[in-house]
Amino acid sequence: MTDYEYIITQLKKCHFSGWDDKVMRDCIDRLPNLSRQELTALYLGKWVKEYAVFKEAIFNIMFADKIGLREERIRNLDTEALIAEFKDKKGGNVSLCREELKARYEAGRDVDLIAEAFTASNKKDQQWIIKQEKKSKDGDKK
């Protein structure tokens, strides 16, 4: 019995009787041995729909080479490009850009540019920048 056949058999059993942790761990440990086609078939199959942990393990194996690349690209952008991507609400990277901008602001990099971008953004971002400015003023008084 191949690893793929074993996993399918276990998925079918567990679908009706529930997951046993040892069986799930064994199936997850066998996933790296499968071809991309077999992983895709498992990921899209009806037997894994209810098992988020198993489905996530398949996804992580399939896209291991791409995980983290987006975050790295965001970190390497200069502040002006980062702000432009932050303002693009349909780009899909607003949250990542926001976190990177906050980290840069707290590190003292391009504070004026970031403050301007956050002031023009939503209410939560505006409140955050006001809070940061108060902290810096309180720090200057001490």
Image (spheres, rainbow, N blue to C red):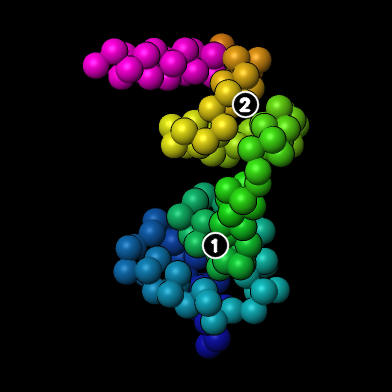
Dividing the picture into quadrants, the one containing residue 37 is bottom right
Q: What main secondary structure does the magenta stretch of the protein show?
A: helix
Rate crowding at label 2 as few (under 14), some (14 to 19) or many (20 or more) other CA atoms within 10 Å.
Answer: some
Magenta residues, as a range? 125-142
- Count every numbered label the image shows and give the total: 2
Closer to us: mark 1 or mark 2? 2
Is residue 123 placed above or below 55 in the rendered structure? above
Specify whether residue 102 is painted magenta. no
| Residue 40 position (above or below residue 140) | below
- Sequence-wise first label, 1 or 2: 1
User: Residue drawn 53% across and 88% down?
Assistant: 1
Q: Which mark is residue 113?
A: 2
Secondary element under disc 1, as helix, strand or loop, is helix
Placement of the C terminus among the 4 image quadrants: top left
Q: Where residue 45 sits in the image (x, y, percent)?
A: 64, 60
Say what amino acid the circle numbered 2 marks.
Answer: Leu
Where residue 88 is drawn, which disc sits there? none
User: Which image quadrant is residue 112 in?
Assistant: top right
> Of helix, strand and loop, which one carries label 2?
helix
The residue to which callout 1 is attached is: 60
Q: Is residue 67 above or below residue 120?
A: below
On whether residue 129 falls in the magenta region, the answer is: yes
